[in-house]
Image (cartoon, grey):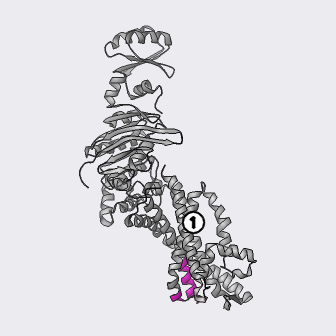
Amino acid sequence: MKLITATPWGVYSVWWRHFQVYRSTWLVNCLPPISEPIVYLLAFGYGLTPLIGDVEYLGQMIPYSRFLAPGMIAIGVLFQSFFEGAYSSFIRLNFQKTWQALLTAPLSYTDVFLGDWFWAATKGSIAGTLTGLVAVIANLYDLPSLVLSLPLIVLGSLLFGAFGLLVAGAVNKVDQVNVPIFLVIIPMFTLCGTYFPRDTLPPLLARFASFLPLASLVDLLRWPLGLPPWWPLLLLWLIGWMVVMARLAALRIYPRLFS
Amino acid sequence: MSGALSLTAYDLWKTYGDEAVVQGISFTLAPGEIVGLLGPNGAGKTTTVGMLFGTVIPTKGFVQFGPWQLPGQGQLARAQMGIVTQEDNLDPDFTVFDNLTHFAHHYRITGAAARQRAGELLALVNLEHRADAQVDDLSGGMKRRLVLARALLNEPKIVFLDEPTTGLDPDARQDFWRLVQHLKANGCGILLTTHYMDEAQRLCDRLLLLQAGKVIDEGTPADLVARVIGREVAEVEGVGAERLKALADRHGAWYRAFGGGHLVTLPDGEPEAVWSQIEAYHPSRLLRRPANLEDVFLRLTGSVLE
């Protein structure tokens, strides 16, 4: 892949195309990121808090629902950015041939790739922010904290959007997207400290869960409750994952468009 | 950038593994000219077009379009190109009108200017009455016209039409041909790939005949037919190959098995002599007709276009 040239307009134009599709059905598109966290917070927050009460996190006791809220934000980021990158990009690449059409315009591969990636990240960021707003309304996360967490939401969205694009470039049939969902996304979703502190897991499993990038994102999003002393490493870990995922995704998709 | 631009392909090669699908293709496309790549499926037409606009990276050779060299400057070159690919890649998420206005955005044509341009182009391709329709509700011919309209958003200096009328009914093909001739009249250079002989003969100023990735001959349609075949051929059934071979050898004609019978050229110098002798054989079916590009291809390659 030698022809790496991108222009701000080109990237924006591709992103803008996806935004226009989203805008045309914005009400439907906004429903999942709002309804999902409400359901989770109601079900787990109200359902489990009386059973669990407080949980211990970084040496302090915290109401379970306040522990849960940052996990819900991270899950919103994970699902929306990954699914946009994986399913929607796969469809645009293999069924609708949107990528191929865009490459008949004065756009480079990098323009189209970055436009798709940033759009996946935008959807993850919208979901994370809306989830955060639900948590703010439920008094489980402070609004200033949510504002300060926005860069983390964007970083997580970029990372999982890139992972989605890597999957879109790696699979040949849309059903194969289920493989990384069951092998990676579901384990991350359940084990990475979203619903319970990872300390409760057996040591080996806890170590494996901590290795997965969602764990770092959840830990960082819980900064209002406290941060582990090595938090800068968590940030670097996320950035590293993002760079690797984006690079691999770009390399996998390129041969599908250029021969 | 204003003014006419020429495109020149210099010794284009493309190999996949050990297979060379394009082998040393060179040609120039001048402004206002329609050049056709005519060949059967698998001859390398689409691969060649891909190299011309930058999605296929040549194994060897390059393309010069105005000041830009491809593949390296494909992005810049495409700002002056219009591309109608073989596959339908219209945007099913948008209406007919929005397909144009949203695509115009990639050329930095936005707002009222985009809407005006979209309206002009829908009128040009006779789709203004379907502006609010969904793409999936269009007929095949309408879709191809919309793809052409999309390719003209930037008022390109050169247009690539890759098998633009495949699968269209005769009326839709005529409509499309009318648009192509309109573009030519406006000074646009057009590269057309097709395996339809009548389309090539009707539209193209110059043809490159492709087989197995190589240009096997080139010229104007009329020159090719006159040079390779002559003015007329006879389609003969019910006469033995030996008799026709002997006849052809005597008169310097060419003959070949074709369908259930044979084709025999009627030499320009003495067509009546050959014709009357064929008639004397009392064939079960006999047709005298003008020679065409199909005959040229058959003679040059031994196979028919499909």
Q: Is residue B287 above or below residue B116?
A: above
Circle 1 residues within 10 Å: few <14, some 14–19, many ≥20: many
Q: Which residues are drawn in magenta?
A: A128-145
Q: Main secondary structure of the magenta part?
A: helix
Q: Which of B183 and A254 lies nearest the eye of the viewer?
A: A254
**Residue furthest right as drawn:** A202
Q: How many numbered callouts? A: 1
Q: Quadrant of the N terminus of chain B?
A: bottom left
Chain holding disc 1: A
Q: Which of A206 and A96 lies nearest the eye of the viewer?
A: A206
Residue B102 % position (x, y) = 39, 62
Q: Is residue B239 visible?
A: no
Q: Is residue B12 left or right of residue A152?
A: left
Identify the residue under disc 1: A163
Residue A188 % position (x, y) = 65, 72
Q: Is residue A169 visible?
A: yes
Q: Which of A138 and B39 lies nearest the eye of the viewer?
A: B39
Q: Which of A169 and A133 lies nearest the eye of the viewer?
A: A169
What amino acid is at disc 1? Phe
The quarter holding residue A174 reads bottom right
Residue A146 % position (x, y) = 53, 85
Q: Is residue B94 above or below residue B305?
A: below
